[in-house]
Image (cartoon, rainbow, N blue to C red):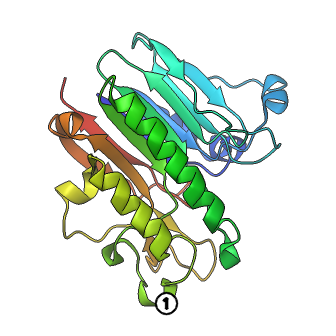
Amino acid sequence: MKIISWNINGIRAVIKKGFDKFLESEKPDVLCLQEIKISDDARNKEIFDFAGYQEFWHSAARPGYSGTMTLVKDGLKVLGEEKFSNDPEGRVQTLEFEKFYLCNIYFVNAQRGLSRLKYKIKWSNRLLTFLKKLEKKKPLIICGDFNVAHKEIDLARPKENQKNAGFTLEERGWMTKLLKAGFVDVWRAQHPDKVQYTWWIFYANARARNIGWRIDYFCVSDKIFRKISSSFIEDQITSSDHCPVGVIIKQ
């Protein structure tokens, strides 16, 4: 099973940049998208054709903001959706499969000036309680844009970003807490010393210079980790400021 996660920075924008060709070439069994930036009302007025896939949408209440969507290949059975309460920004989608739960998550950005840092930590703590309850039923696959670089190896300029959103002690501490709760950062576990990024700021020619951050993750229960044959970062795909990340799970 091939699962890919990608912050696309707008569903309309990525479709204009060859999203259909991406689906055709990658052929993921499951594709988790973040920051779809389309409301339910707007989506219902447009036609989206993802041939061969079941669609699961979770738009934010605010138009043009946040939101998640998951595409599941036809024939792959989804047993249900598990809701995370009080989620008006459409940040958490949970799908139940036969052997695991899959959580597609777009984590809160602490923002410049750290204006949402306290909210992010409070929200993330509530989310962790939800994830732990889910894991009591079945193993868990958590993927998405976490909006945090966990270690210094995960961003190009750690010293300059010590107190900036995405690299604060509070955010990194929460990530540590998630991993101590029994989840494995798949890519880092399989590539302990490799420097590779998943997001680059739009200005200052950052992507060409590879001044980036690794803030997109797959974190999984140990039972799932043992079945993951490989993980990857597709930084050659440039249709968004983020690139796709993925895992291959042995059946």
| Vertical side of 20 occupied by 123: above or below | below
Give the residue pinned by disc 1. 160
Q: Name the residue rendered at 62%, 67% in the picture.
A: 117
Q: Residues within 10 Å of mark 1 (few under 14, many from 20)?
A: few
Q: Position of residue 119 (x, y in %)?
A: 65, 59
Q: From where the camera sits, is residue 171 visible?
A: yes
Q: Nearer the viewer, residue 84 or 33?
A: 84
Q: Nearer the viewer, residue 144 or 22?
A: 144
Q: Name the residue rendered at 49%, 38% in the picture.
A: 104
Q: From where the camera sits, is residue 28 visible?
A: no
The amino acid type of the residue labelled 1 equals Glu
Q: Quadrant of residue 157?
A: bottom left
Q: Position of residue 21 (x, y in %)?
A: 51, 37
| Vertical side of 220 occupied by 216: above or below | below
Q: Nearer the viewer, residue 191 or 21?
A: 191
| Vertical side of 52 occupied by 178: above or below | below
Q: Which secondary structure, mark 1? A: helix
Q: Position of residue 93 (x, y in %)?
A: 55, 32
Q: Nearer the viewer, residue 161 or 52?
A: 161
Q: Name the residue rendered at 39%, 27% in the picture.
A: 101
* The furthest residue to the bottom: 160
Q: Quadrant of the N terminus?
A: top left
Please state the total of marks drawn on the protein image: 1
**Image position of 201 (left or right of 225):** right
